[in-house]
Image: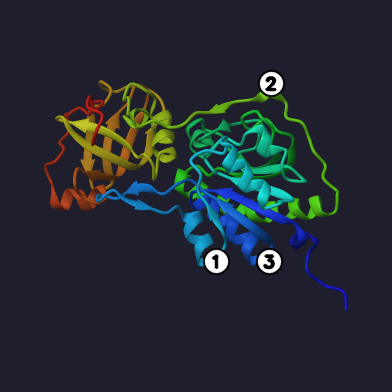
Amino acid sequence: MPSTAPARTGLRVIFGGTPEFAAHHLQALIDDGCQIVGVFTQPDRPAGRGKKLAASPVKELALAHQLPVFQPASLKPPESQQQIRDLQPDLFVVVAYGLMVPEAVLATPRHGCINVHASLLPRWRGAAPIQRAIEAGDRETGITIMQMDIGLDTGDMLARVSCTIESDETGGSLHDKLAQLGPPALLATLDAISANALRAEKQDDSHTTYASKISKQEADIDWQQAAVVIDRKVRAFNPFPVAFTSLDDQPLRIWMTEVLSATNAVAASGTVLSVDASGIGVACGEGTLLITEAQLAGKKRLPVADILRGNPHFVTVGQRFSQLETSGL
């Protein structure tokens, strides 16, 4: 009796990825019965207050399923490349790996290397496509699966699936949405590879934008910006690195906001206009913003109404928020 298993399960696949987003895709391959001959992930990193070495989500998942794990600091050394050749892969699937894949590795698998990227290429090539899409006010994003080449997210597109960016979307909610959108597209691409039915499309480089890595300093709110711009930044940087500001030289993390008014400047930027259970109204360079969820130094994130119950005078009308001069919180 002929096997009913998908043809893609016959591919010898190496998976390369590190964070939770990548782990969602590895789980889909595992659940589908794909033949995963090796999992590459970044070396364990110090994490938490104790700075103990912690495994990546991809490593934890791979070990739970008894998959061989490799953690080179780079894929450039000959020994790392030999590890890949020894696995005799048909395909290398890369999802948020965090390491450059050199040309020698790209050429090793029979079907090359494919990448699952969290944007609709060629928009938002680079390290932080989810956050940059929200920050820019994009109304749509998605997943692109591409054939990798030596450029940065420049390879031919093999599949694209889109989704809407909602008006209250955060970096966290969009991450989760795309983590559900990517795996089915990846499995469909593997089907096309197995059937020799790929339809590659070149990227239009004239439409390229670059999603640079986010620095903590970027999250320091400049109240001279427009309320709509600040609101997008707050949502984009939730849950990391989290937008923040300074009040009397004390840091305040800002988790959620609402735009009360998009036009007119009614007071100096950063001036507190109102404080009540609905939130903290703040004058911006253009318009007014309402802080609805925040976090005092050393405390938990809470709705502003809850913060005021425990700290009723931590902020008063007329005070001004400013950028935090120091680099730490």
Name of the residue lying farthest toward the left: 313
Q: Are marks 1 and 3 in contact (CB under 8 Å)?
A: no
The image quarter in which residue 69 lies: bottom right
Compute the Cα span from label 1 to label 3.
14 Å
- Asked whether 314 or 38 is in front, the reply is 38
SS at mark 1 in the image: loop
Which residue is under mark 1? Answer: 66
| Residue 143 in view in this figure | no
| Residue 146 in view in this figure | yes
Badge 1 crowding class, 10 Å Cα cut-off, few under 14, some 14 to 19, many 20 or more, is few
- Asked whether 130 or 307 is in front, the reply is 130
Residue 209: x and y, percent? 59, 26
Q: Residue at x 26, y 26 (%)?
A: 323
Q: Is residue 38 above or below residue 203?
A: below
Question: Residue 289 bears which disc, if any?
Answer: none
- Asked whether 90 or 33 is in front, the reply is 90
SS at mark 3 in the image: loop
Which residue is under mark 2? Answer: 206
Compute the Cα span from label 2 to label 3.
40 Å
State which tag comes first along the sequence, 1 or 2: 1
SS at mark 2 in the image: helix
Q: Is residue 114 left or right of residue 26?
A: right
Q: Is residue 130 above or below residue 310?
A: above
Q: Is residue 43 left or right of residue 24?
A: left
Q: Which amino acid lies under the numbered mark 3 shown in the image of this protein?
A: Gly
The image quarter in which residue 294 lies: top left
Q: Which amino acid lies under the numbered mark 1 shown in the image of this protein?
A: Gln
Which residue is under mark 3? Answer: 33
Compute the Cα span from label 1 to label 2.
45 Å
